[in-house]
Image (cartoon, rainbow, N blue to C red):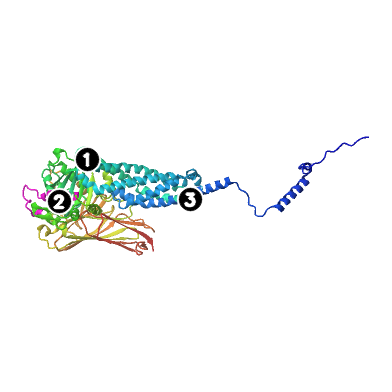
Amino acid sequence: MHQPTPQPRKTMRDVHKPLPRKRYAPELKRAEAAREHERVLHRKPNTPTRIQPVTIGIAAGVSFIFFSLFFFAHNALAIIARIKAQLPGLKTAATTLNTGNLSTELQSLSADFTALDRQAHAPGISLLTGIANAFIPGAGMLPDAVAQGAALNQKAADISKDVDFLKNNALGLATSGHGDELVAAVTRIDNNVSSAKLIADNLAAEASGIALSNGPLASAAKLVSQEYNRIEPDFAAASSGIAGLRTLLTAPGDQHILVLFQNPTEIRPAGGFLGSYGDVVLNQGNITAINVDDIYNADRQLDLKIAPPEQLSGITPTWGARDANWFFDFPTSAKKVASLLQDSNLYQPTHIFFSAVVGINTNVLQSILGITGPIDLPDYNLTITEQNFLPELQHEVELGPDKKPGQNPKKILSVLMPLLMQKLHTLTADQKSQLVATLADHVKTKDIMAYASDSRLQEFLNTADVAGSVYALPDDFTGDYLAVVNANVAGGKTDALINQHVALTSTIDADGNVIDQLAVTRDFQDTNQTDWYYLVPNKDFITILTPPGSKLLALTGNDAARTPVPPAPELSIDPDLARIESSETLNRPMQTLVGSEWNKISFGAWLTTDPQKTRTLTVQYQSGNPLPIHDGMTYTFVFEKQSGVDGSLEYTLIAPPGYQWKESGSPTFTYDTEQLAARETVTATLVKQ
């Protein structure tokens, strides 16, 4: 009998074996749905999704790094803002060696930079700064910019330290045989300034790169870049100038510095009359001699025969060093005086050359005496003080026992100067600080000016506003310029008693023309003087300097023009004098010389003021070329002070029809001062009414 084939026994594995997907799709869907329903029914409430610990660590690390990067950028922004705030101070320190409180601020910045640099090199930040540019544009450049900023800050701090050292010790080192220390300090400054210049260039490049990005860093970096571009020429001049000073101090052999003692009681265009001068001998930073002499001594030994300026032709047949500070531009006057002295037989046989010239008005010496205290001169039975310095010296020079043929009437200065130097060598720390501040104030008022034959050092002096150069109007200058230049010609020492007031009203018409009404008032005050040189009339030749293109409209109150004495045929003509005088023509109705000098239009007239009298010269002229009148136009007025001439200035500016000045809120803007700086600059903004 046939038996059926046995079937395999089903097991539990067979019961739950997945069905083929394609053939049993409906059954598969029902089974998966049942299993999901069972999982939902048996799930524990609030069971969290499980995340691997490694994932948590990575997220926390990235968050920490990005937060660190954010705070790093925030701190960098704060320091960038502080750097911007310090840039004007760095400029001032670089160009005037006036560090002020800069050292303290630089030390504070140094601490900030150290902390910021530490942040910049924290783990992960350097790696992610490139990625961070997507979130904080410019962040990728920050670490290098921080390093450059820290290096620049350190250089600035080192420079500031040495500058402070020199301010307090330079004179003592130079006069005590320790010039090597002075040279070493200047050498360090030279090296650090050169290094700082390179670092600053790199930092400016970094800032420019950051400024091209968008975001909070861009605006701050742009400000830094703009500020640096503004001061970079001054920075370069400082670097070059310090190198020039180093060359002067380290040059082999004796270097001669000419010191001009200018007496403003007898005013001349570049300062006071040159009655005396000093020859300071410098060797490797050491002052080895100070020789003070009467300038007439050198002139008597000058073989050159040169025609004098036309205004002096009535009182002297020839020109000499005594009258060579005839130019309002001090570098021109300084070179001329030095050249005539060098050509005299006093210096020419030994080929002495003056490497630099310093002009000092006598009121500077008065201020120094106020710090050092009185100086006894037993040979003259005198005690020289701040109060009696000038009257007593003038009395000795004009009426004293040394005023004899063959004698040196300026001998009293030769006796005084070594004693004054001894006093300066023993100043206390407070007195040294007071001396530095006092001399800085005299520079600001043009009582101290300097010229150097080294072009690098001269450029530095120009940048630092110490050179006494005539202001060069920019090509895009919009505004007005004025200088009133006095020259005492046989008027004694009467400028000591003259009070000068300058009043200028500038009216701008609808076409942009500037019509100037100028009044120069000279008041000869009564101070009960008895010496003859205070009692003669004040004879003044006034030169008014105005912008190019100016036209004289009227001039009243002046004396008749003087006819110059023709020079003798054997006299040579100085080229600088010839350049000015050949441009001049006499306006006969106004008795005024109209010409050009220093790229300015000049109006020249004589004005004599008797004792206890007042004279006023009035001048009306159209200043320069028409202005581009528009809303928001910035107008600049520059008044250039003459060295040795104090007084007051009153300036009134009247807007064109339909406009007013933003600063005053009216069509009239006024400015006045009784303390004239070397160069007064006034700006006003034109707005539509």
**Tag 1 residue:** 284
Q: Position of residue 352 (x, y in %)?
A: 17, 40
Closest to the observer, 70 or 240: 70
Q: Which residue is mark 3?
A: 70
- Mark-to-mark CA distance, 3 and 1: 54 Å
Residue at mark 2: 312
Residue 147 x, y percent position in the rendering: 41, 44
Distance from disc 2 to disc 3, alpha carbons, whole Å, reads: 74 Å
Please say whether residue 78 is one of the residues in the magenta stretch.
no
Query: Which of the labelled discs sits on residue 505, or is there none?
Result: none
Q: Is residue 454 visible?
A: no
Q: Tell me the element at label 2.
A: helix
Could you tell me residue 524's position as x and y percent? 16, 61
Say whether marks 3 and 1 touch (CB < 8 Å).
no
Q: Which residues are the magenta region?
A: 396-425
Please state which of the two labelled residues, at mark 2 or mark 3, is closer to the viewer.
Answer: 3
Between 165 and 349, the one nearer to me in the picture:
165
Give the quadrant of the C terminus: bottom left
Mark 1 Cα-neighbour bin, 10 Å: few <14, some 14–19, many ≥20: many
As shown in the figure, which amino acid type bears the numbered disc 2? Leu
| Residue 418 within the segment the image draws in magenta | yes
Q: What quarter of the picture does the N terminus occupy?
A: top right
> Residue lying furthest bottom in this view?
666
Q: Residue at the spot x=31%, y=48% of the render? A: 160
Q: CA distance from mark 1 to mark 2?
A: 41 Å
Q: Which element is circle 1 on?
A: loop
> Which residue is the extreme one toward the right?
1
Q: Secondary structure at mark 3?
A: helix
Asked whether 637 or 184 is in front, the reply is 184
